[in-house]
Image (cartoon, rainbow, N blue to C red):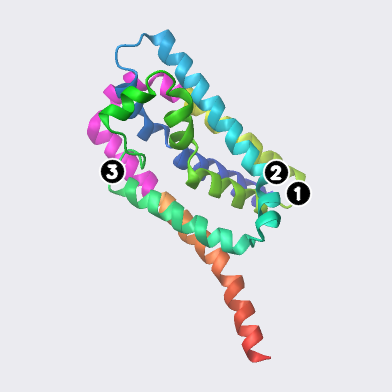
Amino acid sequence: MDNILAYAMLCLTSIFTLANPLGTMPVLLTMTQGMNDKERSFIVKRATITAFIILIVFVFAGQFIFMFFGISTNGFRIAGGVIIFKIGYDMLQARYTHVKLKDDEIKTYANDISITPLGIPMLCGPGAIANAIVLMSDAHDITMKSVLIGSIAFIYILTYYILRASSRLFNFLGETGNNVMMRLMGLLLMVIAVECFVGGLKPILIDVIREGSV
């Protein structure tokens, strides 16, 4: 039971931090400037559904991808740890999102920003995908798999409501409050990344040492 609770907490915290709805708020407000609440709500709904579907696809296709490309789970943990650490470092510097958009790009995306860039790669980027695949590889039974799927669904539902209330939340927290939240989430993400990296590196080093001693 304790293992399930610890796994659930890891799923919720890591997925929420990598989805990063708080960091997406200012970008959303900039890109939807001049839109009414109904139009903004539609965009947010479509973006969160897109991100959820993409992440679920990678969760279930992850093991197939490993087999198809001959990738080891431990190697993927190391690469995923590096990616997640970089995202966490950016957040620790209070950089709202790792996706950089120019004014002309915002105009280009204006017709359908819900899928790109909001859904992908902001709400579901490389870090979120890598994290979800690693979490799925750690899910050893149907209960843990259910916890992971439920956590993803819960986080994107929460993300939907956070982004719907983005204008009010952004005004309430202010720039200082957003920066503090971003730094705390970034620090948490860096710790998760280190655990992921070490978890992948340790078995590889043990195998190397065993082979060297033979």
The one nearer the camera, 144 or 113, is 113
x, y percent for residue 39: 42, 11
Q: Using the image, determine if residue 159 lies above or below residue 189.
A: above
Marked residue nearer the N-terminal end (3 or 1): 3
Q: CA distance from mark 3 to mark 1?
A: 37 Å
Using the image, tell me which numbered label, if any, was put on residue 141: 1
Q: Dot 1, how many residues are within 10 Å of its Cα: few (below 14), some (14-19), or many (20+)?
A: few
Q: Is residue 113 left or right of residue 106?
A: right
Q: Dot 2, how many residues are within 10 Å of its Cα: few (below 14), some (14-19), or many (20+)?
A: some
Q: Which residue is mark 3?
A: 94
User: Is disc 2 placed on a helix, strand or loop?
Assistant: helix
Q: Which residues are magenta?
A: 161-186
Q: Residue at x 73, y 43 (%)?
A: 143
Q: Using the image, determine if residue 2 lies above or below residue 100.
A: below
User: Is disc 3 placed on a helix, strand or loop?
Assistant: loop
Q: Is residue 172 left or right of residue 190?
A: left
